[in-house]
Amino acid sequence: MIKNDLKNQIEAFVAQHSESITGGLSSILKFPTISGGATSADAGETDNYARAVENCMNFLHEEAEKMGLSWRNHANRVAVIQFGPDDMPFVGLPVHIDVVPPGDGWTHDPFGGVVENGAIWGRGSQDNKCAVIQMLWALATLKAINKPLVRGARIIAGTSEETGDWSDLDLYHNAEPQPEMSIVPDALFPIIVGEKGVMNVRVVAELPGDTGGFAGEYRFARASAGERANIVPCNAQLCFAGAPSLDPAPLENELKRFLDRNAGASALFSRNPDNGEVIITFAGKNAHGSMPEAGHNAALDLLLFMTQSGFVSDDEADVAQFLYDCGNDFSGDRLGIASTHPFIGPTTVNLGILKWRAGEQADVIFNIRNTMGLAYDDALRHINDAVEEFSDETGFDMTARSESKMYNAIYTDPQEHTEFIDALKEAWSAFTGREAALAAIGSTTYAKAFPDAVNFGPLDPEEAPELAHMANEHVTIDHHLRNVKIYAYALTKLCTQS
Ligand SMILES: [Zn+2]
């Protein structure tokens, strides 16, 4: 009876405000808060980003004020929208207002805030501006329900999630108190209680002077694959220097034999008639770096071909073999970091970027998802040991080092947080009629920056395609409104006396 009362109250409030809830998302999508493409080298882009963030912050300030929620803005880098008194413990609601660049292939203006065919379209409509508006309206609902509080709730709106820089949250932690627990709406429903860690490790082999020995024949010159470490590269280029007079047939036949032996591999052979240069382009399949097995890594085909090619020196082939072994073993065994956790799953390795210039160096970046129990500093030590062992055996000068901020895995044990997890389960079931299973992910969200943080939505993967970072990102109005209800219900459970 009481449960139904709460559900009905929430349904009524959301129905009454449905136009504003939809309009709020449409409005916030119009600010081009693109952080993923902004670099300090590109001052114009950085200025646009700063202006868009400022406008977006002003918009949120106005919305919060209209709802009677308090607002604190720390230098337009992180803002807090607060319900409940200052001195009360609170549920944190970390979200981010920055987005990745729109890319191509859109049928709607990515920053138009278009509402059409029962959906709201635009960059950020799934990741993560929908959740900003949903949490805002969940707070408004909680406020309207007007029951005595046992906890407050605070939206923590960051601005540099997509860059991985997270200095916004450093600022938060310096200026603001820690939430007791956090609901992070930046992944999938139902409930994600764990995330693997993440580390990008760069392995460099110095190969000076290894440029000759094949006079009068084709000769390996350079190789490249991948632009972002956290993506399985679907394209890899291998280049052989030659001369216009050289016959490319032996090299072309070598490739044919390779493709015959390796059914999964695919490659195109091309030759520049002006300088005789041959370029072999390997084609694979993209996938997220946390799921190397879901893609087909073109860089691995390239490296394997190098290990077998007569137009590559023995030293280069040895290094290619080592890099291939490290990248082809998704479990990290060759790097000495294979490990698994019964709930979070295994450590994974993706060879994400390859840059190799003959006579200079081979340079790769491994995107590693270290599981629970494998701390990043231990993992880095094991990788260094593996690289050192190989370089001792072979005499190559090789190093491994971390390339970006590293994170450990997180896990909120449901047995130890029953009140928290039960509130989320109940909220999910109340508005979907479905059981809330617990899951873990290999990707990284703001959950890693807060204690006892659990991802809860915003995407319902059973009913909607995942379009974060893709063209035609959109959310149905139904799901947008339903999420407000789910979040409002969970917050009412956690924040008010039952
Ligand atoms: Zn996100």
Image (spheres, rainbow, N blue to C red):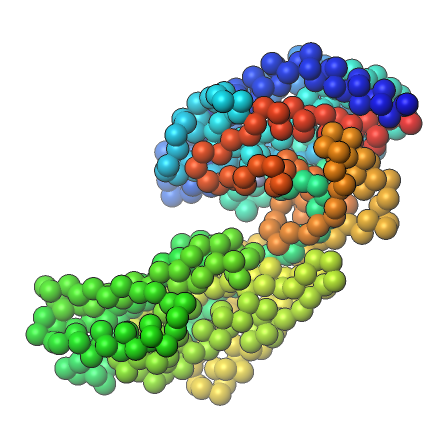
Percent x, y of residue 274 = 10, 64
> Quadrant location of residue 140?
top right
Quadrant containing the N terminus is top right
Position of residue 318 relative to residue 222, above or below, is below
Position of residue 317 relative to residue 108, above or below, is below
| Residue 169 visible, this angle | no
Instruction: Tell which residue pokes out farthest to the left in this image.
Output: 245
Position of residue 354 relative to residue 481, above or below, is below
Quadrant containing the C terminus is top right
Residue visible at 52% across and 25% down? 120
Residue visible at 76% across and 41% down? 435
Q: Quick one: 346 or 69, which is closer to the camera?
A: 346
Q: Quick one: 67 or 189, which is closer to the camera?
A: 189
Residue visible at 90% across and 23% down? 2
Percent x, y of residue 243 = 12, 72
Percent x, y of residue 205 = 42, 74
Q: Quick one: 30 or 385, which is closer to the camera?
A: 30
Q: Quick one: 457 or 63, which is closer to the camera?
A: 457
Percent x, y of residue 147 = 87, 19
> Quadrant location of residue 144?
top right
Left or right of residue 287, residue 410 in this image:
right
